[in-house]
Image (tube, helix red, strand yellow):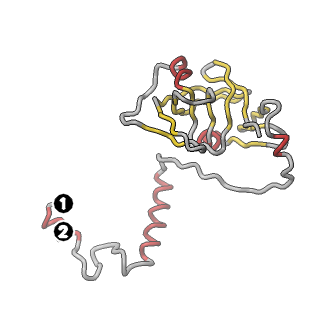
Amino acid sequence: MKPLSVRGSTNKEAILFLVDTGASCSLIRAQLADRLTKHRRSPTKLVCLLAANGTEMRVASSLFAGVQLGSFSGEHHFLACPSLQWKAILGMDFLGRFGGVLHLRDSQISIGSCVVGFEKGRPADVCSIVDWKTAFEVEVLNPLRSYKTLLAMLTQLVHTLSKFRDVFALGDDAPGRTSTRLTRQTTGR
């Protein structure tokens, strides 16, 4: 089965993007990243990614680059890898951030109102045997959570911990435990 790919451009350079629903992050070949922008950040420590086939890929830098697919245009974060086979890979972070939807039966990807066809001869023909629709949700992990989201998570955590009061103490009233006030007086923290 051939991979899903779509023609577009990044920073006005024509490119064939691999659309990879198995990739959690978007990647770009390091040599292409060198030409596209001077605003790259190199990791302070060695960072390696593990590909689905078990190959380790070193991350040389990270950058934001413009992505154009049909009438869609947006800036996106990429990790630059020297050994990347494709020029660029659009992962689930891209699809989640911009609301990308794959329409395999129609051999298209839609991002908002923009619809772009997949490259001809790609696996949409093979995948068209699926003749039912199943709704599913994709959670995109966002390390920069909003206050509202954090508050909901904290409320859920407190609720869960309160079910196990005999194991977790939620305050200074826990039986047989040193109070936080006493600990602060003793240790100064």
Instruction: Identify the residue position indicated by label 1 in the image.
Output: 189
Give the CA distance from mark 1 to mark 2. 7 Å
Vertical relation: 119 (above or below) 140? above
Mark 2: few/some/many CA within 10 Å (<14, 14-19, 20+): few
Amino acid type at mark 2: Thr
Is residue 139 toward the left or the right of residue 41 in the image?
right
In this view of the protein, which residue sits in the foreground, 56 or 106? 56
The answer to whether 178 is drawn above or below residue 86 in the figure is: below
Residue 75 falls in image quadrant: top right
Residue 111: quarter of image = top right
Q: Residue at x 81, y 38 (%)?
A: 107
Q: Secondary structure at mark 2?
A: helix
Residue depicted at x 46% and y 59%: 151
Earlier in the chain: of badge 1 and badge 2, it is 2
Quadrant of the rendering where the N terminus is positioned: top right
Q: Nearer the viewer, residue 2 or 38?
A: 2
Quadrant in which the C terminus appears: bottom left
Residue 135 lies, in percent from the top left, at 74, 56
Query: In the image, is 25 to the left or to the right of 157?
Result: right
> Is residue 156 depicted above or below 133 in this figure?
below
Spot occupied by residue 85 in the image (x, y as percentages of width and height): 61, 30
Q: Do residues under tags 1 and 2 come within 8 Å of each other at their CB atoms?
A: yes
Name the mark on residue 174.
none
| In-front residue for pair 93/151 | 93
Q: Is residue 166 left or right of residue 90?
A: left
Instruction: Look at the picture and state if 25 lies above or below 169.
Output: above
Q: Amino acid at mark 1?
A: Arg
Seen from this angle, which residue lies furthest front?
A: 54
Residue at horizontal 38%, vertical 79%?
A: 165
Position of residue 14 measured from the top left corner of the image (x, y, whole percent):
67, 20
Q: Which residue is mark 2?
A: 183
Number of labels in the image equals: 2
